[in-house]
Amino acid sequence: MSGSGARRGKAFVISAPSGTGKTTICHKLLAQDPQLRFSVSHTTRPPRPTETSGIDYHFVDEAEFERLIASGSFLEHARYTGNLYGTSYAAVESSLDDGIDVLLEIEVQGAKLVRDARFEAVFIFLLPPSLDELDVRLRGRGTDDDAVIRKRLAEARSELSMAEVFDYAVVNDDLDTAVEQVQQIIRAERSDETDEVKARYGREGVVAEWRKGAEKG
């Protein structure tokens, strides 16, 4: 650990329904903010063509994932749309102890487990413009068949009911705007001057407004 009195890093948890754009937003945040380090999660999901093991995820089989669970390696783990996802303690604590801020891109179920574990973090929830738009985005990715897309939309509805887990919420209507809004939250939390961002992006108000104007079907 860093010397006595040294700043401990902050953990920023970003979660969203699948297709909302959290991976793209996280990549942009990391590219623009040298003070952030990405926590690489484990998953049993097969890699997509653009993904690299050890950079996007640690891709492992179920047997290895279960071994890691049994050894107590995970801060959180959850099954999502048939695959396991988990965040290891090692991926987070070493960076925080070195005074480096850590970005955790995890599923909503996993974020709830992190919150329940009383792990100190800032929790940011990303919302699609609407569920109809989420459907369009999922189909536009071309990576999932219709049955999987329907399952992901059902999961999204369930995840929206878990929004109270989060401190902040940002609607990803325009990508660059959403990235800037998350950056505002991160900067404010680092400086402990959060009154303005809590007023603008506090989860309760953003989600209530989203439900009034954006949720369809």
Image (cartoon, rainbow, N blue to C red):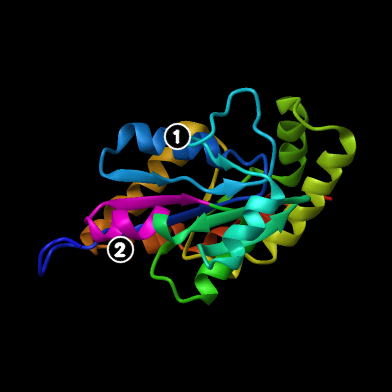
| Residue at point 52%, 62% (across, down) | 74
Position above or below: 70 against 217: below
Residue 19 has which mark?
A: none
Pointer 2 residue? 194
Q: Secondary structure at mark 1?
A: helix
Q: Position of residue 93 (x, y in %)?
A: 35, 60
The span shown in magenta is 91-105
Specify the farthest residue to the right: 147
Residue 173 quadrant: top right
Q: Position of residue 131 (x, y in %)?
A: 74, 46
Instruction: Name the foreground residue: 192 vs 82.
Output: 82
In the image, what residue type sits under mark 1?
His
Pointer 1 residue? 27
> Does the magenta-highlighted stretch encompass residue 69?
no
Is 17 positioned to the left or the right of 148 in the image? left
Instruction: Name the foreground residue: 207 vs 115.
Output: 115
In the image, what residue type sits under mark 2?
Thr
Q: Which mark sits nearer the N-terminus, 2 or 1?
A: 1
